[in-house]
Amino acid sequence: MSATIVFAIIAAIGVVAFVIGRQRAAAQRDGAAKPHSLPNYHGWWAFLLATVPAVLFLVVWAIGASIYTDNMINAQLPADISVGERSLALGMIDRAAGALGALDIHTAADLPKSYADFVPVAAEQGILLASQGQDYMLPIALSVNETATLASRLGGGIAIILALAGAAIGLGMVKPRARARNNVERVMLWALFGASGIAILTTIGIVLSMLSETMTFFSQVNPMHFFFGTVWDPRFAAAGATDSEGQFGLIPLLAGTLYIALVSMLVAVPVGLMSAIYMGEYASPQVRSIVKPVLELLAGIPTIVYGIFAVVTLGPFLRDLSAALAGGTAFIQAQSVFTAGFVMGVMLIPLVSSLSDDVITAVPRAMRDGSLGLGATRSETIKRVILPAALPGIVGALLLTASRAIGETMIVVLAAGVAARLTINPFEAMTTITVKIVNQLTGDLEFNSPQTLVAFALGLTLFVITLGMNVFALWIVRRYREQYE
């Protein structure tokens, strides 16, 4: 029994419980006693009792079944294979189990004689399997399917029984003075608390996962050479060399990240902020209804399209223009910091404009009227009243924009290149941390090698930079808020 069918049955039981519970509560309102809760609350309480325990059981059951299956596979694997081979074997067994299920092979008598014979049979049905599999994988894959089928049927049956029992309990609790509203609101409160907890736990999990891999990386590479190294070349030196650690220098990547982000902010902030001021303070409703949606269309364009525009149109145009101005020698490369920063700034204009416009329009109208009533012009009101009052929100908008600029990847790959170098010339190519994270996590490198683990150190560095920006923004917000208290 598939999980989709089980969830559909549980949802149907919950809907039926809701309808019956509401009708029963409405029928009990005879006017003799004032009911505590409306009929809808009784229906929702029956629905929650029918669905929530059953769904939670299914989730726990699925996790437990997955753990049990993994342990069962590990117990059947040969004891002489290494850790890396074991991880590869687990993936191949999982793939083979899916192929056996698709080919409707459920008994040991129907298994192919060898794994090599099974690969072409699966290929005929459009299922591609790794050719280097071993014969022992097929019986294990068959047992995986048998265990998964049994677990699915047993878990689905228990979940449906729990749903029916919950519906019966919920319907039995329908009484005029039953506190169904309190129960429903309590469940919703815990649901909101759980949603908040998921966000927090997800952040903590991401940080801990990066931190653990980063510590493994720093156990192989000197942190001082990473944070203060000026050479980025993740290939190992020759045997016996002593300078391999210096090949993971962060400085060129960090400089490129901040440089390109700075150029993009110099483009996006003035244009976006001025457009927000115009739309919020000067534009008529008719003009605003046209300009704002058109401006926000830029936010819907995929970043890869901006990158293609930069590498195909803007980069060659700037190169040819600089060559014409310099008499034949181009001083602007097609892939450069300026090209990537300019295109990224255009992409960020809607973000700055939309967020700043929302903040500016949220300033109380009384502040505008008071300033104008005292004889200030509209421009003076904007400079001395509206912008200072909206400054905390604008700082938040700029922070979000800077974070987006620091984390951008595709535009930088196409418009700035992948060369890790140190230069102050904005017309030369540089690269960023995000680009190198992608480079280090693609390919056939081992996951426990420094070349791959360095991606986690780079990711943790980006996290620390963003955290620092948040702390700095909060300091600015508190400082300016104190002047208006």
Image (cartoon, rainbow, N blue to C red):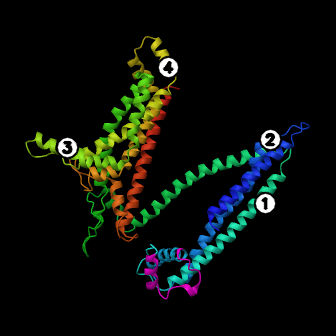
Residue 260 makes an appearance in the image: yes
What secondary structure is found at the residue carrying circle 3?
helix
Where residue 272 appears, x then y in whole percent? 37, 33
Residue at x 46% of width, y 74% of height: 125
Label 3 and label 1: CA atoms lie apart by 71 Å
State which quarter of the image contains the N terminus: bottom right
Q: Earlier in the sequence, mark 3 or mark 4?
A: 3
Residue 183 makes an appearance in the image: no
Q: Earlier in the sequence, mark 3 or mark 2?
A: 2
Q: Earlier in the sequence, mark 2 or mark 1?
A: 2
Where residue 443 appears, x then y in whole percent? 34, 67
Q: Earlier in the sequence, mark 3 or mark 1?
A: 1
CB within 8 Å, label 1 to label 4: no
Magenta segment's dominant SS is helix
Q: Dot 3 corresponds to which residue? A: 317
Q: Nearer the viewer, residue 173 or 450?
A: 173
- Determine if the magenta segment contains residue 159: no
* Looking at the image, residue 143 lies above or below residue 406: below
* Neighbours of disc 2 within 10 Å: few (<14), some (14-19), many (20+): some
What secondary structure is found at the residue carrying circle 1?
helix
Residues rendered magenta in the picture: 102-124
Residue at x 75% of width, y 62% of height: 162
What secondary structure is found at the residue carrying circle 4?
helix
Label 3 and label 4: CA atoms lie apart by 47 Å
| Residue 165: assigned label | 1
- The answer to whether residue 477 is left or right of residue 44 is left
* Looking at the image, residue 133 lies above or below residue 365: below
Q: Nearer the viewer, residue 481 or 122?
A: 122
Q: Dot 2 corresponds to which residue? A: 37
Count of number-bearing discs: 4
Three-letter code, disc 3: Phe
Three-letter code, disc 1: Ala
